[in-house]
Image: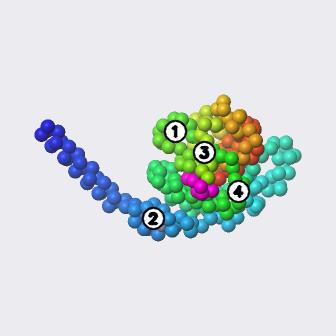
Amino acid sequence: MQLSKNIKKPIIACRILNTFFLDSLFPITCLVCHKKNTWLCQECMEKFPLLSFQLCPYCEKEITQNGTICKKCQRNQFEKKSPLQLNALICATDYQKISKLVHLFKYNFVIDLGTPLGKIIAKALQKNEAPLPDFIIPVPIHRRKLKWRGFNQAEILANSISQNLTPGLHLPVRTDLIFRQKKTRAQMKIKDYHERLSNLHNAFATFPQAEKAVSGKKILLVDDIATTGATLFECAKILKATGAKEVTGAIIARQKI
Ligand SMILES: [Zn+2]
Ligand SMILES: [Zn+2]
């Protein structure tokens, strides 16, 4: 009894010291205004600068109303007979302004940032009068990656959007309809546009219950960051093939390759 007490004491002391040193070395402060004990305070989240315009998700050149497909891309798809599956994409803010927060959230596992980041996306969706979806689908990650990381960052964002897009009405977040069947190379590591597209070819698949749930529905597809948009396009493709009526994407920011 005496022995275990003696062992426990130094362990507790070590933990306290460890926390003390970690907090002094890396104190948690708002990354915008440096207020203590929060990564992004309420005030800075509320006034985070949203994009003043949205671009066509495919060519990224034309400014379009609420991130819909531009006329030129619509014409091209008609001529090539290859329908563009994502109806619109709402991008919340400029990548440079938010990259530090996204990096902490995604790679340093600061899960608490998911709620304010999701709120920023929800505000962008409100600003752009995005159609109210029947439900939200976060872009899935492969089960092995989920096991390694412990969370799907897109799902955390989707839950926050669900709570904040239409207060009082919690939109369902469906993680039981599509899944990532292929463990792809990280898109960030691929520089070539066409290679990025082929990397994701058939990366996603549907669960058996998807057809009934998705058919005729308006879906909000959520991810953290997009570069070429290939991941969102591939998810939208499978959702449309399963019968979805409309698929709108929502992301924090778009990063240049
Ligand atoms: Zn702040
Ligand atoms: Zn376009």
Q: CA distance from mark 4 to mark 2?
A: 29 Å
Which residue corresponds to mark 1? Answer: 145
Mark 3 Cα-neighbour bin, 10 Å: few <14, some 14–19, many ≥20 = many
Residue plotted at (33% across, 56% down): 22
Which of the image's four quarters has the N terminus?
top left
Question: Is disc 2's CB within 8 Å of ligand 1?
Answer: yes
Residues in magenta?
160-168
Q: Is residue 8 magenta?
A: no
- Check disc 2 and give the amino acid type: Cys
Q: Nearer the viewer, mark 2 or mark 1?
A: 2
Which residue corresponds to mark 2? Answer: 30
Residue 29 visible to an observer of this rendering: yes
- Check disc 4 and give the amino acid type: Ala
Mark 2 Cα-neighbour bin, 10 Å: few <14, some 14–19, many ≥20 = some
Secondary structure under tag 1 reads helix
Residue plotted at (68% across, 67% down): 52
Q: CA distance from mark 4 to mark 1?
A: 31 Å
Which residue corresponds to mark 3? Answer: 173
Of the pair 126 and 144, the residue shown nearer to us: 126
Of the pair 209 and 237, the residue shown nearer to us: 209
